Image (spheres, rainbow, N blue to C red):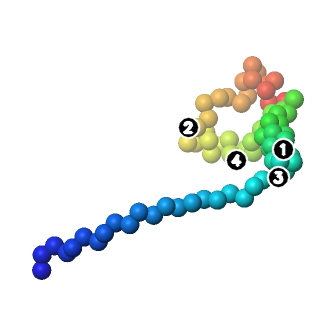
Amino acid sequence: MGNKAAKPERDEVLLKIVPPIDQAYARWLARDLERIYGFAPRNPRAVKPPDHYIEYMRLNGWLDVNLDDPDLARLFK
């Protein structure tokens, strides 16, 4: 009725074997990922959120910027 005998610990070795990768595919994949994630538009247009989003943000105090400010008008064209 005392302590149970401890189970002997087993050392397990897990191997992760990766199949060889085609070099042409790897170059294509690297170039494709660079094109997708390295893309930045040259002249991004400002987007004004819908009015109900603006109202919701004002009610919760999340909107610190006055969107009718003439100094910021050029950003919202």
Residue 8: image quadrant is: bottom left
Identified by mark 4, the residue type is His
Q: Earlier in the sequence, mark 1 or mark 4?
A: 1
Identified by mark 1, the residue type is Arg
Which residue extends farthest left? Answer: 1
The answer to whether 73 appears left or right of 59 in the picture is: right
Residue bearing the label numbered 1: 27
Residue visible at 75% across and 23% down in the picture: 72
Residue 45 locus on image (x, y percent): 84, 33
**Secondary structure category for the residue under label 3:** loop
Bin the neighbour count of mark 3 within 10 Å (Cα to Cα): few under 14, some 14-19, many 20 and up: few
The answer to whether 31 appears left or right of 60 in the picture is: right
Please determine whether, in this image, residue 13 is positioned above or below residue 25.
Answer: below
Residue visible at 70% across and 47% down in the picture: 52
**Secondary structure category for the residue under label 4:** helix
Mark nearer the viewer, 3 or 4:
3
Residue bearing the label numbered 3: 22
Instruction: Measure the C-alpha gap from mark 1 to mark 4.
Output: 46 Å
Q: Is the C-beta separation of discs 3 and 4 under 8 Å?
A: no
* Disc on res. 61: 2
Bin the neighbour count of mark 4 within 10 Å (Cα to Cα): few under 14, some 14-19, many 20 and up: few
Residue bearing the label numbered 4: 52
Identified by mark 3, the residue type is Asp
Please determine whether, in this image, residue 18 is positioned above or below residue 51.
Answer: below
Q: Earlier in the sequence, mark 2 or mark 1?
A: 1
Instruction: Measure the C-alpha gap from mark 3 to mark 2.
Output: 54 Å
Q: Earlier in the sequence, mark 3 or mark 4?
A: 3
Instruction: Measure the C-alpha gap from mark 2 to mark 4.
Output: 14 Å
Please determine whether, in this image, residue 25 is positioned above or below residue 44.
Answer: below
Q: Is the C-beta separation of discs 3 and 2 under 8 Å?
A: no
Mark nearer the viewer, 1 or 4:
1
